[in-house]
C-alpha cells in the first residue's frame, strides 16, 4: 500500500494589500513614492516635470513629459499588485506595490487620469473607498479630454480624504535632498504649491569627480571637502548614495572611521550613484549583505583611503576629560528618559534594548524648582555596573553614543551614523560649550535637541516641547538618584 499524498496550495487574501498602506514612516515618504514612479517613467533626453499641490483635504501629483499610461498600461501594469514590468530593469520600482500603497497611506479616495504621448484623449478612473480591501477592485475607465498637447504624456493623481499630516516646509526640504542630482542636471523639474524646488548650493574647498568600475557596473560621483567657514546645512557628513539620482542612503564612509572617531571626517562629502545593488522595498537602504554591495563597499573604501589619510593628519586639541566623562553620564540619563517616554527608537544603538516592565512605567516625579547640584559618580551607575576595563562600545546597551569632538565653532552639534550607530557629536569649540565648560546641563540639552531632530514634528513649538519633556524627565531622574540612598532603586509611583 503506497503512502497517502495530499495536494495543498497557497492562498492570498486581498486584505494583504491594506497592510502595505502602513509601510511608510511619514507622509513625505509616501509622496516621494509617487515622485519615484514619475522618475521611472522618464523618456530619454526629455526633461520631466512633476507638480505637487497640497490642499487641506487633498493632494495632487502630476507628472508631465514621461511615458504616461493608456488603457493597456493601466490594467496590465498599474492595477497589478506584486507584478511590475520594471522588475529586472535598473529602475527604482521593482515590487509592483509602491504607488498604490502610497495612495492608500495618504487618503481614502483617489482619481487617476493618464494619457500616453501621441494619444488624442486621456483616461480617468476613481475609487471612492480605496481603503476597503475586502476584494480586489474593478474600475470603469472613462474617456476624458487631454490636458496637455497631444505629444506630451502625463499621469495625474488626485488623493482625497487625506488624514495624514503633510508638513509642506519639511516636504520641500526632503524633495530637494532626495532628488538633488536630478534637479541640478535639470533632468527633473519639481514644484510644490507652484514654488520651484531647488537644492541649496554646497560650499566646498575641493571636489573631484570619479567614474570607476565594480561588480559589473559603473559607479559615478564626486568626493570633496566642505568649507569649514561655510558648513553645508542639513548635510550628514559622509557620502550620499543614490540610485538613478534618487537618494537611498547618506552618511556612508564605506568602512572608514566616521567623525565620532576621527573628527576631521566631518568635512568629507560626496555623492555616488549605485546602479546595480538591490534596494529594500521602500527604498530606505541597499541590500547590504549581497555580493554587489560588498564589492561596491570595497571599491569605495579604496577610493576614499587617500582622503581619509589627509583628514587624519588634521590634529585638534582634545576636549577636556571631564567633558567626556559627563557625556557618558548624559548618555545614561537620556537612555533611561527615552525608555520611559517609549521613544528609544530616536537614539538607536548597537542592539534594541528591552526595558523591563518598571522601566516602561513613567514615574510621576515632582517638578524641580532649580537644578540640583552635581551628583557623585556612583549615583549615576546602573544596578549592575560593568568592570572598568569593559570597552565603551560594550556598555551602550542598545542606545547611541554621545561624543565630544572639536568642529567648526559655528556648529553646536550634529548627528552622524557610523556602523549603524547613531552618534551625537557635541562640538567642544562651540562658544557656549566653552562658556559652560561642557557641564551636564549643557550637554543634556544639546544631545536632546539632536535626538529630537529624528522625529517628525508639525511645528517648532512641538519640537521644543519634545526636547523639554525629555530634558525634564532626565533632570527628574537625576534628582531622584541624588535624593535616595545609594543602592536603592527608583520607586515608581502609580497614578
Image (cartoon, rainbow, N blue to C red):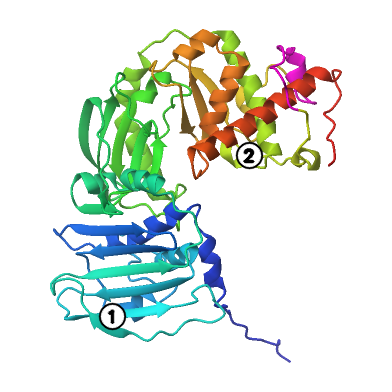
Rendered residue at 18%/46% (across/down): 185
Instruction: Judge from the rendering whether residue 301 lies leftward or rightward of residue 14; answer left or right.
Output: left
* 195 shown above or below 201: below
Sort mark 2 into few (<14), some (14-19) or many (20+) by Cα contacts within 10 Å.
many
Q: Quadrant of residue 297?
A: top left
Instruction: Judge from the rendering whether residue 222 lies leftward or rightward of residue 370; answer left or right.
Output: left
Q: Inspect the magenta stretch and tell me whether residue 368 lies in it.
A: yes
Quadrant housing the N terminus: bottom right
Instruction: Judge from the rendering whether residue 150 lies leftward or rightward of residue 424; answer left or right.
Output: left
Q: Which mark is residue 376?
A: none
Q: Inspect the magenta stretch and tell me whether residue 203 lies in it.
A: no
Can residue 204 be seen here? The reply is yes
Rendered residue at 82%/29% (across/down): 490
Sort mark 1 into few (<14), some (14-19) or many (20+) by Cα contacts within 10 Å.
many
Q: Nearer the viewer, residue 193 or 101?
A: 193
Residue 24 at x, y = what percent?
A: 49, 56
Q: Which mark is residue 344?
A: 2
Main secondary structure of the magenta stretch: loop
Secondary-structure class at tag 1: strand
Instruction: Judge from the rendering whether residue 28 lies leftward or rightward of residue 186; answer left or right.
Output: right
Per the image, the residue denoted by label 1 is: 123
Residue 414 at x, y = what percent?
A: 45, 27
N-terminal-most mark, 2 or 1: 1
* 147 shown above or below 212: below
Residue 455 at x, y = what percent?
A: 53, 42
* 243 shown above or below 397: below
Q: What span is in magenta?
A: 367-386
Q: Quadrant of residue 392?
A: top right
Mark 2 or mark 1, whichever is nearer to me: 1
Secondary-structure class at tag 2: helix
Disc 2 to disc 1, C-alpha distance: 48 Å
Residue 289 at x, y = what percent?
A: 47, 48
Amino acid at each position: 500500500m503506497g503512502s497517502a499524498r495530499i495536494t495543498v496550495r497557497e492562498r492570498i487574501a486581498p486584505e494583504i494589500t491594506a497592510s502595505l498602506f502602513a509601510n511608510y514612516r511619514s507622509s513625505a515618504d509616501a509622496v516621494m513614492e509617487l515622485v519615484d514612479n514619475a522618475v521611472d517613467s522618464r523618456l530619454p533626453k526629455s526633461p520631466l516635470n512633476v507638480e505637487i499641490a497640497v490642499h487641506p483635504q487633498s493632494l495632487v501629483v502630476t507628472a508631465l513629459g514621461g511615458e504616461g499610461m493608456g488603457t493597456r498600461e493601466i490594467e496590465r501594469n498599474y492595477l497589478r499588485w506584486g507584478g511590475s514590468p520594471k522588475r529586472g530593469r535598473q529602475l527604482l520600482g521593482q515590487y509592483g506595490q509602491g504607488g498604490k500603497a502610497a495612495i492608500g497611506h495618504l487618503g481614502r479616495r483617489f482619481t487617476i487620469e493618464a494619457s500616453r504621448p501621441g494619444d488624442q484623449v486621456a483616461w480617468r478612473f476613481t475609487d471612492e473607498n480605496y481603503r476597503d480591501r475586502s476584494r480586489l477592485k474593478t474600475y470603469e475607465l472613462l474617456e476624458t479630454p487631454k490636458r496637455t498637447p497631444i505629444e506630451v504624456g502625463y499621469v495625474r493623481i488626485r488623493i482625497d480624504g487625506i488624514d495624514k499630516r503633510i508638513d509642506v516646509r519639511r516636504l520641500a526640504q526632503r524633495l530637494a535632498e532626495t532628488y538633488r542630482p536630478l534637479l541640478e542636471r535639470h533632468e527633473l523639474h519639481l514644484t510644490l504649491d507652484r514654488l520651484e524646488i531647488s537644492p541649496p548650493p554646497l560650499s566646498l574647498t575641493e571636489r573631484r569627480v570619479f567614474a570607476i568600475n565594480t561588480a559589473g557596473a559603473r559607479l559615478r560621483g564626486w568626493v570633496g571637502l566642505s568649507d569649514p567657514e561655510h558648513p553645508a546645512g542639513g548635510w550628514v557628513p559622509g557620502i550620499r548614495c543614490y540610485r538613478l539620482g534618487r537618494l537611498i542612503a547618506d552618511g556612508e564612509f564605506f568602512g572608514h572611521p566616521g567623525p565620532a572617531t576621527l573628527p576631521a571626517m566631518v568635512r568629507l562629502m560626496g555623492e555616488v550613484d549605485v546602479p546595480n545593488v538591490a534596494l529594500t522595498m521602500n527604498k530606505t537602504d541597499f541590500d547590504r549583505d549581497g555580493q554587489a554591495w560588498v564589492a561596491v563597499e570595497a571599491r569605495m573604501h579604496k577610493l576614499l583611503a587617500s582622503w581619509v589619510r589627509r583628514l587624519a593628519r588634521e590634529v585638534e586639541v582634545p576636549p577636556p576629560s571631564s567633558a567626556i566623562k559627563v557625556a557618558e553620564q548624559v548618555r545614561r540619563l537620556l537612555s533611561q528618559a527615552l525608555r520611559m517616554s517609549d521613544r528609544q527608537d530616536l537614539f538607536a544603538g548597537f542592539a534594541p534594548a528591552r526595558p523591563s516592565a518598571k522601566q516602561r512605567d513613567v514615574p510621576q516625579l515632582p517638578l524641580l524648582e532649580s537644578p540640583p547640584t552635581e551628583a557623585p559618580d556612583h549615583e549615576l551607575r546602573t544596578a549592575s555596573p560593568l568592570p572598568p576595563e569593559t570597552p565603551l562600545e560594550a556598555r551602550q546597551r542598545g542606545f547611541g553614543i554621545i561624543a565630544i569632538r572639536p568642529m567648526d565653532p559655528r556648529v553646536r552639534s550634529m548627528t552622524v551614523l557610523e556602523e549603524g550607530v547613531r552618534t551625537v557629536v557635541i562640538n567642544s569649540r562651540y562658544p557656549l560649550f566653552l562658556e559652560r565648560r561642557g557641564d551636564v546641563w549643557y550637554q543634556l540639552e544639546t544631545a536632546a535637541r539632536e535626538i529630537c531632530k529624528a522625529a517628525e514634528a508639525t511645528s517648532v513649538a512641538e519640537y521644543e516641547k519634545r526636547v523639554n519633556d525629555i530634558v525634564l524627565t532626565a533632570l527628574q531622574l537625576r534628582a531622584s538618584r541624588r535624593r535616595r540612598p545609594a543602592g536603592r532603586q527608583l520607586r515608581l509611583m502609580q497614578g
